[in-house]
Amino acid sequence: MTQVNTTSYKTIKLWKISERDKRPEGYNLKEEDGRYRDPTTVTTLRVPVFRPMDLMVEASPRRIFANAHTYHINSISINSDYETYLSADDLRINLWHLEITDRSFNIVDIKPANMEELTEVITAAEFHPNSCNTFVYSSSKGTIRLCDMRASALCDRHSKLFEEPEDPSNRSFFSEIISSISDVKFSHSGRYMMTRDYLSVKIWDLNMENRPVETYQVHEYLRSKLCSLYENDCIFDKFECCWNGSDSVVMTGSYNNFFRMFDRNTKRDITLEASRENNKPRTVLKPRKVCASGKRKKDEISVDSLDFNKKILHTAWHPKENIIAVATTNNLYIFQDKVN
Amino acid sequence: MERGWLVVLGVMCVIWFVEDTQEKEGILPERAEEAKLKAKYPSLGQKPGGSDFLMKRLQKGQKYFDSGDYNMAKAKMKNKQLPSAGPDKNLVTGDHIPTPQDLPQRKSSLVTSKLAGRTLYKVKEQMI
């Protein structure tokens, strides 16, 4: 049995996901398809029995948490205490107890008294995997704030502020938009956190606030396409990122149904594609390459032929095994490391 | 002797010029893109990035398809004995549960609005 917290826009639900591989058959008052039988037609009694059936996965809502958000919820994160969780929208973060559905505590509120003064919004939030008093939230300006709930009831003042200094001479109209962090994820160890902005993935050491320790370019070739990406709104796409179980590899999605993996130890990276073309089971995925400019080699794809409607925003890595889940617009792909 | 000095000076100048160009090439793509955008939409906000897109983010009414709610609603119609999860009889998930058919194809773009200035004003009003 698994429990999954989901949010739709402003309401949070806790679902129980279970497998069912048998069903009761032989009711006296109901047909097999559920319709009720006319009791006058029942002439004998029988005892219903369980019979095996095709495995079915069921999701049933177990808790529905009252509407406590004015703006769209962008994150929910269950605490390591398994009793509380947080939910974040553009301007506020609330703390909930899993058993209490009708109220929550507000722990971060960045709404200015005068909305004209609004300069940034909250884009993602997550609890620390081990310290139940610590959480982080990222902003549309590319900053991450770490907060300690022991410091005060309202965590408007951060304990740490992570921000990479920007060279002011490099600033352009797009700078702030592409620096907006779309996802923040702690490493399993709790020592690092990863952020995803439009063009890159950054790894931060929680002990160092002034710059990330590693930066990986996801699709740098898009820098010369920012104008069209702004016009078609793709520049606002929110990509997620994830760690593998040992925190040695990070993964994130891109366009054209491509997804990227970066090995932090070997510094090698790979681009793979989730598509039906290579979907025969046991097929090994072929590495892909995007040709940024100049002569396109065979098997390379030019930037202009990338399909920007095929975006991989959501990816997940099994916490222990080398099994990944990659979501395209209409399909979910599950891949595993090839077994030798 | 003088000739020798002249040559040295010349080489130094060339090195300086090459370095400067290389520095500029790194940021050139983004600046070029910015110029393209400003050429197409001269009325686009003075503040880079900033409040235009922030206001758009906070715009309410963006609905997403929720497969959980959708399937729940379908199940409710088929089978009336759905367990109600606690005291939530009046629960509303947004205004109504979107079906795949009534989702907008694509959210409206900032730049396609011909009344960019006016739109911004409207959005601000809604928020207050």
Image (cartoon, grey):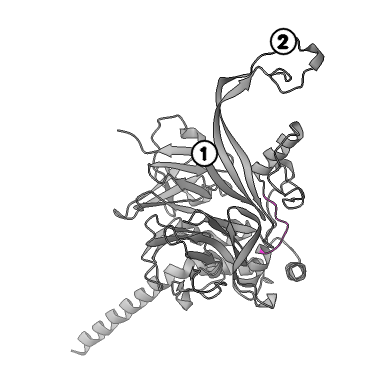
- Estimate the x, y position of residue B36 in percent, counting from the top left: 59, 66
Q: Is residue A51 above or below residue A294?
A: above
Give the residue drawn at x 39%, y 49%: A244
Whether residue A202 is visible here, answered yes or no, is no
Q: Give, as a three-letter code, the residue at label 1.
A: Met
User: What residue span does the magenta drawing correspond to?
Assistant: B58-64
**Residue situated in front as seen by the camera: A332 or A221:** A332
Residue at the disc numbered 1: A1
Left/right placement of residue A73 relative to residue A314 reads right
What predominant SS class does the magenta segment belong to?
A: loop
Residue A98 can be seen in this image: yes
B48 w.r.t. A6: above or below: below
Which mark sits nearer the N-terminus, 1 or 2? Answer: 1
* A313 vs B46, nearest the viewer: A313
Instruction: Residue A44: give its label.
Output: 2
The chain identifier of the residue carrying mark 2 reads A
Compared across the picture, whether A61 is left or right of A264 comes to: right
Parent chain of label 1: A
Residue A116 within the magenta-colored segment of the rendering: no
Tell whether position B62 is magenta: yes
Residue shown at 56%/49% (left/top)?
A: A308
Count of marks placed on residues: 2
